[in-house]
Amino acid sequence: MKKLLAPLAILVLVGSLSLTGFSTGRGKHDFTGKCELCHLVAPQKGQPGIFVQDIDYLCKTCHQIVEGSSHPSEVAPSMKLPKVYTLDWQGRITCATCHNPHDEDAEGNPYMLKTALRGKAFCQSCHKDLFRDPKKHLSATRIAHTKSWTPPTKETLDQALDQVSLDCLECHEGSVGPAANYTIADQHNLTFQGMNFSHPIGMDYAKAAASNRELRPIDDLSPMISLYEGKVGCASCHNPFSHEKVMLVFDNKRSALCYECHLK
């Protein structure tokens, strides 16, 4: 049986950065008594205070993001932003432009976003013209940060493909983007059929690497290789922020991308 798969686009949800410190739960910081971690002087009400380093540098001491596959930061925006999205003293976008590090509503707002908007509506609050051109891959992007690995959820455990790859089908079933076939031998054995090549998809990479010595251990993979829900999918090789040909996560010259996973 043949279906269609998106090899080029990555539709991802507005997500949080990997949390590794000063957290009391998903999306919530506990900075009680720790003002000096970020501020030279404790900020007063309505004032941001003076930071000990650039905001992005401070965020990255605890959060890991794949910069080449995420929304640009530390750059001046090309459009006027709503007032809620603040810039730094140089007029640049920072992590704090979209996120409120002091938001205490971890359950209702796990990503500490500054507005109640989510998904495409959140992106469109700044990128008003982006979604008018369906052929632009960034118009399909719904998060700013890719991750090297995300766990499966209760809703996705029985899915053959990860949700990111499934979302790609919205365009790459031929209506907007070029259609790409994949074959299904059974629910957990899929193969992408490209031009003159094929590649397994939908498989749990960690499990495959544990039983196949020709695959690099998952901990040794480049953070540019994304495994959403732990699976090989569109996001493993492609990213809409990429400037490489066919939006590869990095240049495949001399099969560099292939050898990132395959030892032989």
Image (cartoon, helix red, strand yellow):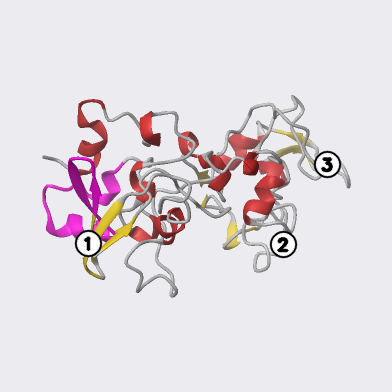
Which quarter of the picture shows residue 57? top right
Which residues make up the magenta segment? 192-221
Pick the residue in front: 38 or 90: 90
- Where is mark 1, residue-wise? 207
Amino acid of disc 3? Lys
Q: Position of residue 209 (x, y in %)?
A: 19, 54
The answer to if 193 sits in the magenta stretch is: yes
Callout 2: SS: loop
The answer to if 146 sits in the magenta stretch is: no
Residue plotted at (44% across, 45% down): 177
Lower position in the chain sequence, tag 1 or tag 3? 3
For marks 1 and 2, give the CA distance. 37 Å
Residue plotted at (29% across, 43% down): 221
Callout 1: SS: helix
Q: Give the number of the mark in front: 3 or 2.
A: 3
Q: As displayed, is residue 77 above or below residue 185?
A: above
Q: Give the number of the mark in front: 1 or 2.
A: 1
Residue plotted at (61% across, 38% down): 58
Lower position in the chain sequence, tag 3 or tag 2? 3
Callout 3: SS: loop
Q: Residues within 10 Å of mark 2 (few under 14, many from 20)?
A: some
Q: Position of residue 109 (x, y in %)?
A: 67, 62
Which quarter of the picture shows residue 251? top left
Q: Residues within 10 Å of mark 1 (few under 14, many from 20)?
A: few
Q: As displayed, is residue 188 above or below residue 125?
A: below
- Where is mark 3, residue-wise? 83
- Where is mark 2, residue-wise? 104
For marks 1 and 3, give the CA distance. 47 Å
